[in-house]
Image: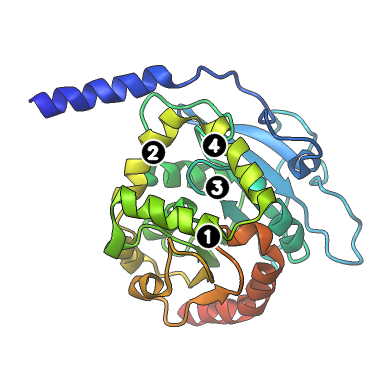
Amino acid sequence: MTDSLLERAHARGRRLLRRRRPLHLHPSLAGRDNPLDRLSVELVRSGKTWVRVYRKAYSAPGTTPGDRFPGIPHRRHHTERPAQHPERPTFVLIHGIGVSSRYFTHLAEDLAELGDVFLLDLPGFANLPQPKDALSIAGFAAVVHEVLTAHGVVSPVILGHSMGAQVVTEILARRPGFARAAILVGPPVNDAEGSVAMQALRFMQSSVHESRGLRLIAIRAYLQCGLAWFLDVLPEMMRYPIRERLTHVSDPVVFVRGEFDYVAPTAWLKRLGARTPHIITGAAHSVIYAHDGELFSLISKVLPSLAAARAEDE
């Protein structure tokens, strides 16, 4: 009984520490010349939560350049939706704990050469309102699926980084056949080192190999998130059984890690089911930012084989 009372008291204390934040189309503390400002953006409500959705339009060499989807104004609410081209992939990028879509801006520019790109700021992050109770990974997955379905996204290539890889896994475990393929980058939590202390140590070891620019983005993102929400979501990430949930995923999955990613070592990815995990040379945990070019080349290379594998399954 005492432990239960203490747990409820701690949870109430964290809720009181959360900042009451107004709803803004753009997050504050974004820094000058934020590449996200050049994208189409809207706020979408899902139940009692809010998601910020960015879009980068298909802009292959030789096409008319432009960051916004045709016919979609730069405003908070609208009813028009972009038509999805059946022959081009649509990419969806899901960030990890404490951070935001800002990490994905370079990669989104790259992927737009192949198809349309959606970037989602998850509830409670990037200065979005924080729900009364922390969302589980299944809760985040349900919100993402609802938002993508409402936007007419069909058979996407869905990429999740860090905790975002857990969210992607849960979507596909619950919705077989939803995605053309999944790309899991640095998925946690290594079951051989499942304590918060060990994960913090591995994250710090990886951080030594990250760029200064990435560290600045991370600081802004953690300030936008706030400590209380981070601590509320952290246990959900730590307890998520990604290894077991992946056994329920039938869509093609690609596993990626950085050479210096101590959060997601190769042995762990093999236990998750990767026969030959893809390793980005020189990268650490945040492969998606400083090594977006290498990751884009990898995605471009594996997409045809993933499409073939999906066709065989169908």
Mark 3 to mark 1 CA distance (whole Å): 30 Å
Q: Is residue 159 above or below residue 308?
A: above
Q: Earlier in the sequence, mark 2 or mark 4?
A: 4
Q: Earlier in the sequence, mark 2 or mark 1?
A: 2
Q: Is residue 216 above or below residue 241?
A: above
Three-letter amino acid code of the residue under disc 3: Thr
* Residue under label 2: 233
In the rendered structure, are the residues bearing label 4 and label 3 in contact, judged by CB atoms less than 8 Å apart? no
Q: Is residue 101 above or below residue 84?
A: above
Q: Earlier in the sequence, mark 3 or mark 2?
A: 3
* Residue under label 4: 222
Closer to us: mark 3 or mark 2? Answer: 2
Where on the picture, by quarter, is residue 273? Answer: bottom left
Residue 91 is at least partly visible in this image: no
Mark 4 to mark 1 CA distance (whole Å): 16 Å
Circle on res. 285: 1
Circle on res. 149: 3
Residue density around tag 4, few if under 14, some if 14–19, many if 20 or more, within 10 Å: some
